[in-house]
């Protein structure tokens, strides 16, 4: 490939230039992680495609296209995207190829927020790109979607809130890598109930959801180590050793290694 692929966490300068991030209204901050719009037209791209890679993640995004379509490459498949779509939680990395004239706007939801908005099991969109109208929503713009969310759609129910709390509890003690039963006990649930909630709300078993969340937390720390002044160590994130970290790195990002 004759042009670079910009990976999230590791290409912070690119993403700061390629996107504008807008403030999330206060009432929506529990549902919406951020609102963004592309600004490829302001970049020096020399007329080439702009290639980006996102890693496995638990969040869903709703993307609106204005102008030309863009391509998504994953697991050997190429999808051409136009019109409002939902990009579901992914357990594999995804590559996006944009023409410089692409105009994109989107909303990234917090993990577990998808179920509250669409009232369908997240397993239906796991590793998938689905047209928004196929999920029973006819929003045609970011403004329509924000208005829908502001009306109360997406409010967290009990199971959704418990999954979100479980993820937070896991990450708060990530250096100890707590298991499902320990977290369920903190929530006054059985492990079986919490497992069922994860399948319904995230479309993933808890162990995989914890692994993806942990890796993303570790990559954020790795990317910010110069600014924070903290030495990066895989042991701080509950990995048994470097080989354990690299195994999950390859699985969820397709990267072979990092300079640690």
Image (cartoon, grey):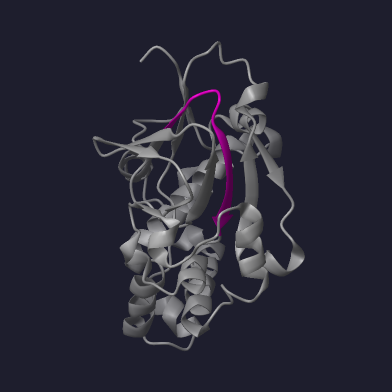
* Viewer-closest of 183 and 82: 82
Q: Is residue 172 left or right of residue 228?
A: left
Q: In the figure, 83 relative to 68: above or below?
A: below
Seen at 47% across and 74% down, the residue is 163
Q: Position of residue 61 (x, y in %)?
A: 50, 53
Residue 128 in view = yes
Q: Which residues are magenta?
A: 96-109
Q: Main secondary structure of the magenta part?
A: strand
Above-or-below relation of 246 to 177 = above
Residue at the left extreme? Answer: 76
Residue 234 shown in magenta: no
Q: Nearer the viewer, residue 40 or 244?
A: 40
Q: Residue at x 54, y 30 (%)?
A: 102
Q: Nearer the viewer, residue 149 or 23?
A: 149
Residue 110 in percent (x, y) is at: 55, 61
Q: Is residue 85 above or below residue 11?
A: below
The answer to whether 54 is drawn above or below residue 210 in the figure is above
Query: Which quadrant would the N terminus be assigned to in this image?
Result: top left
Residue drawn at point x = 55 percent, y = 25 percent: 101
Marks counted in the figure total: 0
Left or right of 209? Residue 68 is right
Identity of the residue drawn at 31% across and 83% down: 192
How far from the left and from the top, in percent, is residue 41?
Answer: 64, 23
The location of residue 40, given as percent across then percent down, is 60, 26
Figure quadrant of residue 121:
bottom left
Residue 236 visible here: no
């Amino acid at each position: 490939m004759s042009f670079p692929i910009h990976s999230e966490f590791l290409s912070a300068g690119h993403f700061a230039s390629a996107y504008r991030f807008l403030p999330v209204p206060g009432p929506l901050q529990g549902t919406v992680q951020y609102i963004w719009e592309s600004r490829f037209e302001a970049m020096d791209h020399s007329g080439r495609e702009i290639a980006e890679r996102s890693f496995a993640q638990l969040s869903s995004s709703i993307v609106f296209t204005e102008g030309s379509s863009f391509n998504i490459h994953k697991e050997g498949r190429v999808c051409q995207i136009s019109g409002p779509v939902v990009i579901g939680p992914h357990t594999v990395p995804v590559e996006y190829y944009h023409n410089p004239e692409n105009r994109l706007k989107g909303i990234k939801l917090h993990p577990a927020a998808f179920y509250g908005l669409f009232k369908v099991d997240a397993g239906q969109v796991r590793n998938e790109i689905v047209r928004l109208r196929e999920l029973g929503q006819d929003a045609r713009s970011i403004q329509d979607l924000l208005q829908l969310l502001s009306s109360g759609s997406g409010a967290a129910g009990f199971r959704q809130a418990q999954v979100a709390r479980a993820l937070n509890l896991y990450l708060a003690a990530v250096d100890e890598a707590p298991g499902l039963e320990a977290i369920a006990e903190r929530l006054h649930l059985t492990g079986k109930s919490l497992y069922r909630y994860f399948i319904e709300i995230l479309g993933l078993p808890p162990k995989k959801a914890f692994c993806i969340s942990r890796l993303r937390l570790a990559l954020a720390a790795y990317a910010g180590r110069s600014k924070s002044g903290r030495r990066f160590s895989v042991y701080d994130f509950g990995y048994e050793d470097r080989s354990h970290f690299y195994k999950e790195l390859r699985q969820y990002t397709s990267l072979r290694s990092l300079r640690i």
